[in-house]
Image (cartoon, rainbow, N blue to C red):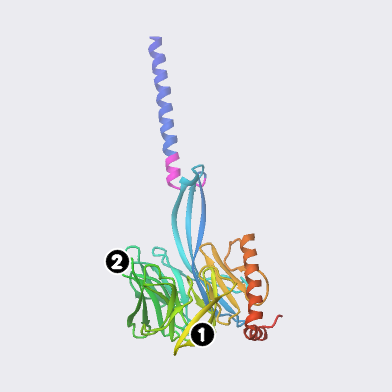
Amino acid sequence: MGWIINLMREYKAVKHTVIGGVILFATYIILILCGCPLFFDYFEYPRYSGWCWGPKNGKGEWTVVYGKITEKVRHLKGAGMFGYKVMGKYVQIAQVNIDGSDNRVLSEIDAKVGGGVCDYSQKTGKVLFVTQATNPAAPGGRDLCLMNLDGSNKELLLNGSCTNAQFSPDGTKIALVACDMSERETSYLWLMDIKSRKVKCLCDVGKDGYDYWTWHPSGKYLITAIKGKYGGAVLIDLDGKIIVNDTPIASTPCFSPDGNYLVGYCNMFRIKRTMSEGKEKWTGERIIGPSGKSPEWSPCGRYIIEGWEGGVTIVDLLYGYTWISLTPGQELDEFGTEQARIALRGFRKWVQENDSAWWDKMIQKFPRR
């Protein structure tokens, strides 16, 4: 009988061990599913989505407006690159002074649709914002919205196919690029009258021309790449008629306020306008200058902002030899700082030697303090 008693004792011990193991495993799974901090690290990953010049602050200085998408991320400890999971996100529009101070959130956008800032109108105080398409018939597309900086009075302007948009200098019109949802290989440059909401197509920019366009400061023309014209671009009027052939162009271009310079990604040109056989001709003299991704020349002509997914920076074309970060948490590497220094030195040297009238005018307007 003794062996039977020992067997029963061993059975109970195994049973208790198995039950204890199951309870422990179940507890572990429950803690994992509940996101217990013992097993997870939590952090936020910000990405910046669009930037432009905003309204003046109380000191009369220009500010910068930018979009920020922040993902809430959870990481399972010890799981390496496979342990990351996005738990949610929130989208904000923020404003900052040109020295990086007073960085504040103005509004928050529906996190389900994400989005990015396209442009701000100095005339109307409105901001253009793109979001992921809400139309099920346009998966992967983008909606174009118009609203105040605080997020109020939001209006849907275009559903499902917009990639970028800019206000006209007088704030009455919007130029935008939208793709053909039936093809997705072709994009068109459109013009919208804000008051009437009437839209007309100006030209076909083809597959690769969606970010090769911008308004001329006069508001009478747009410069754009056009399908079938590679290595150059055209100046068109507000009916899509070509005014000047083969103008200089760069990706994500922006004119200086006086229209004499054009800056884009990795390129800066001085525009020379001449007449030949009764036709106006534009040529671009390439110069060294600040030319990061999606550069935006300030309305006063003194600054250029640029950026990427990791943050937004600013350079002063007149004084100093470095760039300044405008977004929190952005680290400026030594290579980028040195490149900014080289670009600023090259730009100032070229302008002083070749466009002294511009330089003298700017120095008089903004004397060193």
Seen at 61% across and 63% down, the residue is 336
Q: Is residue 37 visible?
A: yes
Where's residue 115, x and y in %? 43, 67
Position of 259 with respect to 2 (left or right) is right
Q: Quadrant of residue 363?
A: bottom right
Label 1 residue SS: strand
In the image, residue 198 sits, relative to residue 22, either above or below, namely: below
Position of 161 with respect to 42 (left or right) is left
N-terminal-most mark, 2 or 1: 2
Q: Is residue 332 visible?
A: no
Farthest-out residue, right: 369
Magenta stretch, main secondary structure class: helix
Which residue in the structure is indicated by mark 2? 183
Label 2 residue SS: loop
Q: Which residues are magenta?
A: 28-37
Where's residue 256, x and y in %? 54, 80
Where's residue 297, x and y in %? 55, 77
Q: Quadrant of residue 326?
A: bottom right
Of residue 108 and residue 242, the one placed in the foreground of this image is 242
Seen at 33% across and 81% down, the residue is 199
In the image, residue 100 sits, relative to residue 197, either above or below, namely: above
Q: Amino acid at mark 2?
A: Glu
Quarter of the picture containing the N terminus is top left
Of residue 108 and residue 260, the one placed in the foreground of this image is 260
Where's residue 67, x and y in %? 49, 68
Which residue in the structure is indicated by mark 1? 273
Quarter of the picture containing the C terminus is bottom right
Q: Quadrant of residue 339?
A: bottom right
